Image (cartoon, rainbow, N blue to C red):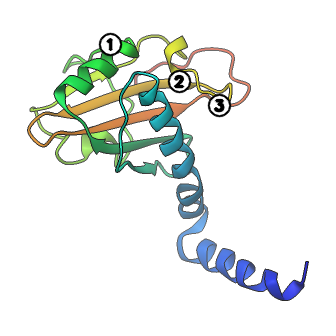
Amino acid sequence: MDPRRLRPLALFLAVTFTAGGCGFAWNLWARGDLARDVTALLARQGVLVSGLKCRMFGTLRAGACTFPLTAGQATQIAQGLRLRVLAPTESVREFRGGCSQTRPFDTDFVRAFRSGPFRAPELKLRDGGSLDYVYLYHHPTSGTACLQASYTQEGATTATPIGN
């Protein structure tokens, strides 16, 4: 390959890391994978979504996606993924910019669900990986949802607590 063709790529990478550091680059790269995996996970439940906007939490293997969703679709996803209602007193894995800290999901007017056991069979991904957990927040008034998830770390064999 011609070295002149690599210069723009090298310049882009240098600017990316200088401007935002590794967190910015990770978010830019990994949020596409999260959007693909969330879209596939919801499609398996018979819910086709569009307009997903995803973000990763720092350099962690966790992130959140927001998207339009009806009340019926939220119920369909909750049943298909075997999510249970999230009690207001339960501890939640909080991340800066997570669903419960993002408008309009930071109000009392949301339906909130969470997955059950660590790496539930319903959270298996098509590439053989898995999600540790899923939180689904649905704001019926705006018809939007936020799905927060964490990928299983490679090599993990035991459960980590879902609490803080």
How much space separates mark 1 and mark 2, taking CA atoms?
Answer: 18 Å
Q: Where's the N terminus, which quadrant?
A: bottom right
Q: Determine which of the numbered discs, if any, sits on residue 132 in the image.
A: 2
Image check: 115 left or right of 141? Answer: right
The residue at the point 34 percent across, 49 percent down is: 97
**Which amino acid, mark 2?**
Asp
How much space separates mark 1 and mark 3, taking CA atoms?
Answer: 26 Å
Label 1 residue SS? helix
Tell which tag, 1 or 3, sits nearer the viewer: 1
Q: Residue under label 1, please give it.
A: 79
Q: Sequence order check: which comes first, mark 1 or mark 3?
A: 1
Q: Observer-nearest residue: 81 or 22? A: 81
**Which amino acid, mark 3?**
Gln
For the residues bearing labels 1 and 3, Cβ distance under 8 angstroms:
no
For the residues bearing labels 3 and 2, Cβ distance under 8 angstroms:
no
Q: Where's the C terminus, which quadrant?
A: top left
Q: Residue under label 3, please give it.
A: 153
Q: Observer-nearest residue: 47 or 75? A: 47
The residue at the point 38 percent across, 11 percent down is: 82
How much space separates mark 3 and mark 2, taking CA atoms?
Answer: 9 Å
Furthest-bottom residue in this view? 4
Label 2 residue SS? strand
Vertical position of residue 61 compared to residue 6: above or below: above
The percent position of residue 136, horizontal first and vertical second, equals 31, 29
Q: Sequence order check: which comes first, mark 1 or mark 2?
A: 1
